[in-house]
Image: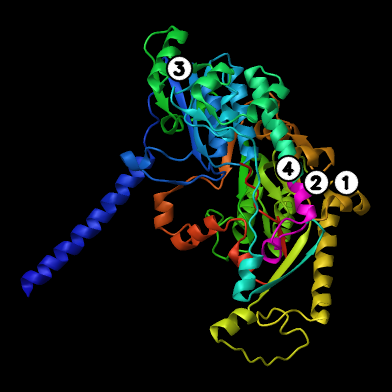
Amino acid sequence: MAKFLLGLICGVVVCVLGFFLLLFLIARAFRETPPAIAENSVLELQLSGSIPERPPVEVPFGALGEHPSPTVTGVWMLLRKAAADARIKAVVLEPESLGVGWGKLEEFRSGLEQFRKSGKPLYAFLKTPGSREYYLATAASRIYLAPTDWINVKGMRVELMYFKKTLDKIGVDVQVEHAGKYKDFGDMFTRSAMSPETSEVMNGVLDSLFTNLVAHIAEGRKLQPDAVRALVDRGPFLADFALEQHLVDALGYEDQMFEAVRKNLNSGEIHKVSTAKYMKIPPDSLGLEGRRRIAIVVGDGSITRGGADDDGVSESGITEEGFNKMLRRIQRDTTIQGVVVRVDSPGGDAVASDAIWREMNLLSKRKPVVISMSDTAASGGYYMAMTGDPIVAYPGTLTGSIGVVFGKPNLHGLYDKLGITKDMLARGKFAAIDSDYRDLTPVELAKLREGIDANYRAFVDRVAQARRRTFAQVEPLAQGRVWLGTQARERGLVDEIGGLDRAIQLVKQKAHIPAPENVAIVMYPARRSILDVLFGRSSDAALESRLRQLLKAWPPDAWTGGGLLRLMPYTVDVH
């Protein structure tokens, strides 16, 4: 018995010591010194997957921490550093399987064009590129493709999925009410094909994005737009044909491309620097940070109310509680001279959107603010930006969708098929308005319309006030219609076309900071370490986080909460 107790005590002591040793090693790993960059280096800019707006969790220790995912702001800073760093002689762009929207792509391409203005060469090596990857590569001075590879550029398409016939088979009816004829969120449940309004909007989106793609390919490859359109109709392209049509500059493998880079630089042996390694180089070591500080606060994902313990660092989208706490911290921080609010959201809960709008306006009264729209800033994502401050969007940003929607399923038919019955007792005229066992009565529908219409009028009023226009001028542009950034700019819904560079220029003007002066960029939320996760700074469970990723455009807690939604009517993924 004594030996057992002794062994148990020793085991507990070893576990405790091991745990604290692990924490010490993790903390030490996060305090590691910046890596050494050799002279005559070439930066490999590897971009793949869905590059996020907010920083992901940092994981230390060798291979586990070898490839931290860059953010959109991180890529922007990476290219600024490479342009200023005398040790970096060139950049090799390697895009692959990108899952980002056309707003972010325009940010990256603009950054690549800015890098080229430094006089340093930019090369691109492609691996079976689609339209997204090839769009970025056309910013390079030379494009390489493997001899047996191909370019999968063949135009663009939009596909929307509808579940009406499936729901009919299982006895489910969904009632959807909305303000604005284009606010067709819920059509997937009530229709089996696009409405005329949806078709009108989607054709406009495709036309604008395709024209933009053709124009940039033509500019980058020194071709005529009509010639590019004719070429796209012949895609995809095998390597030999792509070379023949001047879509690429050379065919070769990656090692051959780097050998060509070495010869063109004519400066001896070159050293490759990975994206992950160069991300660790602090901007101030290259003189890119000044004394004054600008905050970039990221609102990424669907808008929900959140819980009281939400601190704004979780990955559950934009929560009213957490996002507003971040805004209040920025308000109180006297070292912050200006704020860029970066929005990438299709909207969500109407009440949460309004609460965030209020806090955004309070921030605007305390500090200079500029809104920077990413891939999407629509419905509640557009509503929260109505502070009257300058709004900067990309040509391909999805924005607007000024409207309100409510949806309720009737599962009576499904319950019948399953042999389930409900017997209801109620007190109050509208007590059963959100019951899933019957449709709305005409009286209930009128009551619901009253709330939807009032919410819609409030939305249009907010936009009119912020955009310094009348209700009558804004309402025809509302109706729940989604606009691209260029279309929104023409209609006065945004102020300028541009990205992070332009947003920072504008906030510096508002803060009376001279244009040539470098500023320090402070990210909100900051990058989180594994220690933050272990000690509960994020309240997300793994399953919930995964569910939100799968249903990010239709937040389950907003959709099933029975409230009004300021939510974009669909997810647009243009291939």
Residue 2 horizontal side relative to residue 243, left or right? left
Of badges 4 and 3, nearer the viewer stands 4
| 286 up-or-down from 373: above or below | above
Point out the stretch of residues depicted in magenta.
183-202
Q: Secondary structure at mark 2?
A: loop
Q: How far apart are the alpha carbons under marks 4 and 3?
A: 42 Å
At which x and y percent is residue 512? 74, 31
Magenta-span inclusion, residue 190: yes
Residue 135 picture location, percent across and down: 60, 29
Q: Earlier in the sequence, mark 4 or mark 3?
A: 3
Disc with the residue nearer the chain's start (3 vs 1): 3
Figure quadrant of the C terminus: top right
Residue at coordinates 70% horizontally, 37% vertically from top-left? 209
Residue placed under numbered mark 1 in the picture = 468
Image coords of residue 327 (percent x, y): 64, 51
Q: Residue at x 56, y 55 (%)?
A: 312
Q: Which residue is mark 4?
A: 205
